[in-house]
Image (cartoon, rainbow, N blue to C red):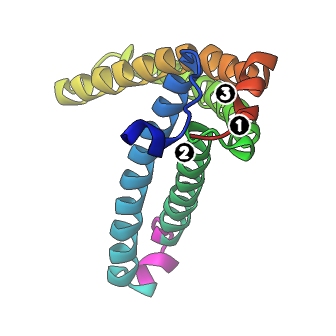
Amino acid sequence: MFKALKGARHARPFAPWRIVVWLVMLLAAVGFVINTYGAVIAAGAIGSMSPEALAAGGPDPRVLMAWSLSYSLGAFAVMALALGTLRWREWGRRAMRVVAGVLAVWAIYTAVVAFHQWQEIGVVLGQEGLPPELLVRGVKARSILLVGVMLKAVSVPVLAWLAWALGSVSVRQQFAQPAL
């Protein structure tokens, strides 16, 4: 009785690209939450800094707030596009191809910057006479940078593959079927 009410379902084959789109959406959600919280903290800092402190050349929390809000809006857009792709919308597939390419390029750029920072910290840590607490913090920061570089090195080919897979004929044909 209920099968007749649901209508005919079109079975789609297993699609590994959907797993990658889910991961992109989840990581964008994490970035959205973290940067929205950062914008709230920056808003509090804007209210608490005096004009004299800003004039003295201190860090401007408005820059942090602008960056955090921009990142949050971008992360929200990525989440919406990923969701559209997961819901088998053609516009989502086309846009997600572009997003995957942009994220791959961004990962390359940030990996290169982080690698240079990793090298610079290594040079500083190689100097004699560093206080032990600074040495411990530097080694920890250097390790975190290296893990980040390795994760980005893995993400670049995965994102490039996603951009390619979403443009392949077999995936385009799956999107031509009626949405569930």
CA gap between label 1 and label 2 equals 10 Å
Q: Quadrant of residue 169?
A: top right
Could you classify mark 3 by the number of other residues whose Cα lies within 10 Å: few (under 14), some (14-19), or many (20 or more)? many
Q: Which residue is at the front of the view, 114 or 159?
A: 159
Label 1 sits on a secondary structure element that is helix
Picture residue at 39% right of the left edge, 75% below the top: 43
Q: Amino acid at mark 3?
A: Ala
**Which residue extends farthest front?**
1
Quarter of the image where the N terminus is located:
top left
97 drawn magenta: no
Q: Which residue is mark 2?
A: 83
Q: Amino acid at mark 1?
A: Arg
Quarter of the image where the C terminus is located:
top right
Residue 130 showing in the rendered view: no
Label 3 sits on a secondary structure element that is helix
Residue 20 showing in the rendered view: yes
Picture residue at 47% right of the left edge, 77% below the top: 54
Q: Quadrant of residue 163?
A: top right
- Sequence-first disc among 3 and 1: 1
CA gap between label 3 and label 1 equals 16 Å
Asked if 36 appears above or below 177 in the picture, the reply is below
| Magenta highlight range | 52-61
Q: Amino acid at mark 2?
A: Leu
Q: Which residue is mark 3?
A: 104
CA gap between label 3 and label 2 equals 19 Å
Label 2 sits on a secondary structure element that is helix
Q: Which residue is at the front of the view, 24 or 111?
A: 24
Rendered location of residue 41, percent (x, y): 33, 67
- Sequence-first disc among 1 and 2: 2
In the displayed structure, does residue 110 sit left or right of residue 122? right
Q: Which residue is mark 1?
A: 93
